[in-house]
Amino acid sequence: GSDVSGEVIAVESGCQRLRRGDRVWGDIGANAFFPNGTQTKELGAYGTYAVALETQLGVFPETLGYVEAGTLPKVSLTSYKALVWYAGAPWKTDDTVVLVLGGSGGTGTVGIQLAKAFGASKVITTTSEANAAYCRSLGADEVIDYHVANWWDVLQPDSVDVVYDTVGQRGTADRAMKIIRTNGSFVTIAGSLSNHPKPGVHQHFFINSDTNLDNYGLLDDLSELAQGGRLRMPSINGTYALSDVAEAFQQSAGGHVVGKIAIRVD
Ligand SMILES: NC(=O)c1ccc[n+]([C@@H]2O[C@H](COP(=O)([O-])OP(=O)(O)OC[C@H]3O[C@@H](n4cnc5c(N)ncnc54)[C@H](OP(=O)(O)O)[C@@H]3O)[C@@H](O)[C@H]2O)c1
């Protein structure tokens, strides 16, 4: 497990920011290296106690409860990096159109909210009809039901500034190139890049866990957004006890979670 929210119960002498009793949240799932150069994945969030670097933990957003806050760090850091690091947010123009593919998933839920918070004038998303109202409640202005229409048929050439792909369907990057305007960005966290990128369009794939050892500044920005009511996880599609983690994974693997599922550690 990667996501944590809770209280600091002990700190090492080198810690500078955090103290025992502080309430924190964070994503402790990080790709790191052993001294011999072998890559490892730091995890350990599925437990009553977790060990984290001080630099991985941000100040808890006091407007949220532990369960909701515990579902947010990974999907929020991923969507923040996608939009801010790789797609130029916050946007300064008053005509920035963002397409979030898969708006009802965890990263999509945050992607829609952050796109709005960072100044998108229009957010378009894809999901099923059943989740359309949910996506609109997050801030989506237009919802395309992927069962009845293809976004690449519906959207005009050169009509979108950013495509944030959380679905990873084959062919997405090439299709996105047609609809993205010059100086726009294609960012995928789940699929491939185009072999024929359009001149003037930037494209990126990244893995959030590659840059997870020092996230507290980003978490504090996200905490501020949460406390200002601009970032939430309004749909928790199931809450599981620690002993039922395998069941939670089964639900997640089904590919139809709306928002997030949570593991409760009492
Ligand atoms: N690179 C990274 O650092 C990184 C970080 C986090 C996640 N990821 C990856 O990002 C992907 C998304 O993960 P997630 O946890 O945010 O969401 P998720 O749980 O995988 O998404 C489920 C949602 O996707 C919707 N969906 C399924 N097929 C769709 C389609 N063809 N078009 C539009 N929506 C569709 C479903 O809606 P319906 O029920 O209506 O179908 C459901 O609400 C995963 O592949 C994950 O591994 C990558």
Image (cartoon, helix red, strand yellow):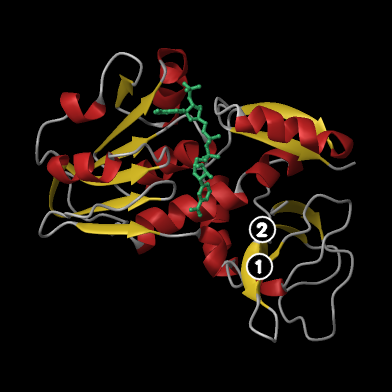
User: Up-down: is 232 above or below 118?
Assistant: above
Tag 1–tag 2 contact (CB < 8 Å): yes
Q: Position of residue 98 (x, y in %)?
A: 27, 41
Residue 56 lies, with reference to residue 1, above or below; the image says: below
* The one of 39 and 119 positioned closer to us in this rendering: 39
In the rendered structure, which disc, 1 or 2, sits on the residue that comes first in sequence? 2
Q: Position of residue 129 (x, y in %)?
A: 40, 13
Q: Is mark 2 within 8 Å of ligand 1?
A: no
Q: Find numbered disc 2 in the image and state the secondary structure of the residue it sits on.
A: strand
Q: Is residue 8 left or right of residue 92?
A: right
Which residue is nearer to you in this view: 222 or 106? 106
Quick check: can you spot residue 63?
A: no
- The three-letter code of the residue at mark 1 reads Gln
Q: Residues within 10 Å of mark 1 (few under 14, many from 20)?
A: many
Residue with the mark numbered 2: 26
Please, what is the three-letter code of the amino acid marked with disc 2?
A: Gly
**Residue 105 location in percent, x, y?**
51, 33
For the question of whether residue 201 can be seen, the reply is yes
Q: Nearer the viewer, residue 197 or 126?
A: 197
Could you tell me how far apart the alpha carbons at marks 1 and 2 are, in whole angstroms? Answer: 6 Å
> Would you say 146 lies left or right of 185 here?
right
Residue shown at 25% from the left, 23% from the top: 150
Q: Residue at (42%, 43%) from the top-left corner?
A: 111
Confirm if mark 1 falls within 8 A of ligand 1.
Answer: no
Mark 1 element type: helix
The residue that mark 1 highlights is 56
Of the 4 image quadrants, the one containing the C terminus is top right
Q: Which corner quadrant of the image does residue 257 belong to?
A: top right
Q: Residues within 10 Å of mark 2 (few under 14, many from 20)?
A: many
